[in-house]
């Protein structure tokens, strides 16, 4: 299957990466709870999923130091601990 | 003031082969003397100054070229023959250094890359600089790093035309961000220029080549080797992945070190930007670029790991070189440039005029 077989799903996509952040691509804006826009600084961003980043809402790699695991693709044989 | 992005001056020779080559490059392209076989005297290619400078002289012809050197040298056959001899020794040495990697299936590549980059037990340059690095030491660190960061991302761009489909899109997605997404002031190489400008260091392209030792040239030559040989495209993407995977946390330490030493927001921005950017690049590099490539070409899995292991092994030697020199109270730069360490630059009142590491 080539990428052209999969039509573009939406204006923006959110992809949970294994044991890591949510990667957001496409046409999006990051808005703070008070309604102000947060400068995303790049076209593709990583949103922290472990909650421990010093740059919330963005990932800063801290999840690795913490050994953050998330059972994105549960398999019947191995437990994701 | 010369063009800050233009060609660098030819560095001083470091042995018979680099001397012969440098002399030849100053004249019109011609066949190099067919005399005694090219002989590098160093026992370890990674610390052989003559060999590493010879490689660097050859490779730079494919980037921006050298001041006063004709462009046609880039594809001069007898020069390419000398380069091939140096490259063979260099590639053997890095394969030995990187060691053998476990055989993994393409599906297990992300986990293998993760293991490789987290099991690293090497000395931490970032930790040292953050806790007790001095300003002269931090400046030395920047001088070493300037060889790469003033052309940041360029070596991996060689990979773009060699890939197709999803891994190509992934590589371009990373490179776009490295190059500022079309905004020159956001290019990582530009952020680095600002940082070293703020510290009073010469920020012109290739300004510090004479100052850096073989190991620093070797870290750069490895990227050029992988980038210029299509057969090594697996190693090139593995190299990029390991680069990105070992970046966010150390860059936070470098930024903290510079803040402690008095660096302002403009000076630390290069490091602060990398904490956030490389947290994104890492995911793309591992899961879309490397895993994407080995889904297409499973036979490249071992080379991807080799490229990644090369980063860790060379980084380790590089860190040992710097920390070893500093522990012995020496400069980690070559003696011709040791005046750098004696400069007592005060970050808040840095001179705007560049301080060169070589006499020009
Ligand atoms: S997911 Fe990366 S720091 Fe939280
Ligand atoms: Fe970068
Ligand atoms: Fe990056």
Image: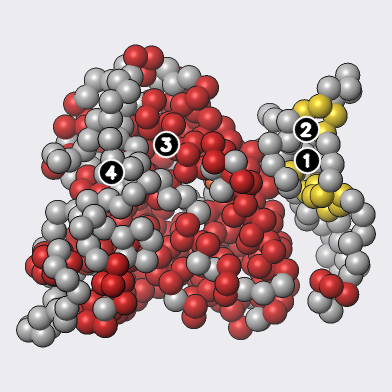
Alpha carbon distance from label 2 to label 4:
38 Å
Q: Which residue is mark 4?
A: B207
Q: Is mark 3 within 8 Å of ligand 2?
A: no
**Image point (72%, 72%), residue name:** B165
Looking at the picture, do discs 2 and 1 lie on one chain?
yes
**Residue extending furthest toward the left:** B35
Q: Name the residue nearer the viewer: B212 or B166.
A: B166
Secondary structure, mark 3, is helix
Q: Chain of mark 4?
A: B
Q: Which residue is mark 2?
A: A57
Label 3, residues with CA under 10 Å away: few <14, some 14-19, many ≥20: many
From the image, state whether disc 1 or disc 4 is nearer to you: 4
Q: Which residue is mark 1?
A: A47
Q: Is residue B226 above or below residue B147?
A: below
Marking on residue B193: 3
From the image, state whether disc 3 or disc 2 is nearer to you: 3
């Amino acid at each position: 299957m080539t990428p052209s077989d999969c039509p573009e799903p939406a204006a923006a996509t959110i992809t949970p990466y294994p044991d890591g952040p949510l990667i957001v691509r496409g046409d999006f804006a990051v808005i703070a709870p008070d309604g102000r826009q947060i400068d995303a600084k790049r076209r593709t961003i990583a949103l922290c999923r472990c909650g421990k980043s010093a740059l919330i809402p963005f990932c800063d790699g801290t999840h690795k130091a913490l050994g953050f695991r998330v059972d994105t693709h549960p398999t019947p044989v191995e437990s994701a601990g | 003031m010369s063009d800050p992005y233009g060609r660098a001056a030819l560095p001083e020779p470091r042995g018979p082969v680099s001397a012969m080559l440098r002399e030849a490059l100053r004249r019109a392209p011609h066949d190099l003397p067919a005399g005694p076989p090219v002989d590098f005297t160093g026992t370890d290619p990674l610390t052989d100054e003559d060999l590493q400078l010879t490689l660097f002289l050859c490779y730079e012809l494919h980037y921006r070229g050298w001041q006063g050197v004709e462009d046609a040298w880039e594809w001069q056959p007898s020069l390419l023959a000398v380069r091939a001899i140096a490259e063979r020794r260099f590639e053997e040495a890095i394969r030995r250094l990187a060691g053998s990697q476990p055989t993994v299936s393409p599906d297990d590549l992300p986990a293998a890359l993760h293991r490789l980059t987290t099991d690293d037990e090497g000395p931490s340059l970032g930790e040292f600089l953050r806790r007790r690095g001095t300003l002269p030491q931090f400046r030395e660190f920047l001088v070493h790093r300037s060889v790469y960061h003033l052309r940041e991302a360029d070596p991996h761009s060689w990979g773009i035309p060699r890939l197709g489909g999803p891994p190509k899109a992934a590589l371009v997605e990373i490179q776009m961000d490295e190059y500022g997404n079309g905004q020159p002031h956001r290019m990582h190489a530009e952020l680095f220029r600002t940082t070293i400008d703020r510290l009073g260091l010469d920020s012109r392209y290739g300004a510090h080549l004479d100052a850096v030792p073989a190991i620093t040239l070797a870290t750069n030559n490895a990227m050029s080797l992988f980038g210029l040989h299509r057969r090594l495209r697996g190693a090139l993407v593995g190299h990029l992945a390991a680069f990105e995977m070992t970046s966010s946390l150390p860059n936070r330490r470098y930024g903290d070190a510079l803040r402690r030493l008095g660096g302002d927001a403009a000076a630390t921005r290069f490091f602060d930007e990398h904490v956030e950017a490389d947290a994104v690049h890492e995911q793309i590099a591992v899961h879309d670029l490397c895993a994407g490539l080995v889904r297409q070409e499973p036979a490249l899995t071992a080379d991807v790991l080799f490229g990644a292991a090369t980063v860790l092994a060379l980084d380790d030697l590089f860190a040992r070189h710097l920390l070893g020199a500093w522990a012995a109270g020496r400069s980690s730069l070559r003696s011709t440039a040791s005046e750098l360490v004696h400069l007592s630059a005060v970050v808040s009142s840095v001179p705007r005029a560049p301080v060169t590491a070589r006499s020009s």
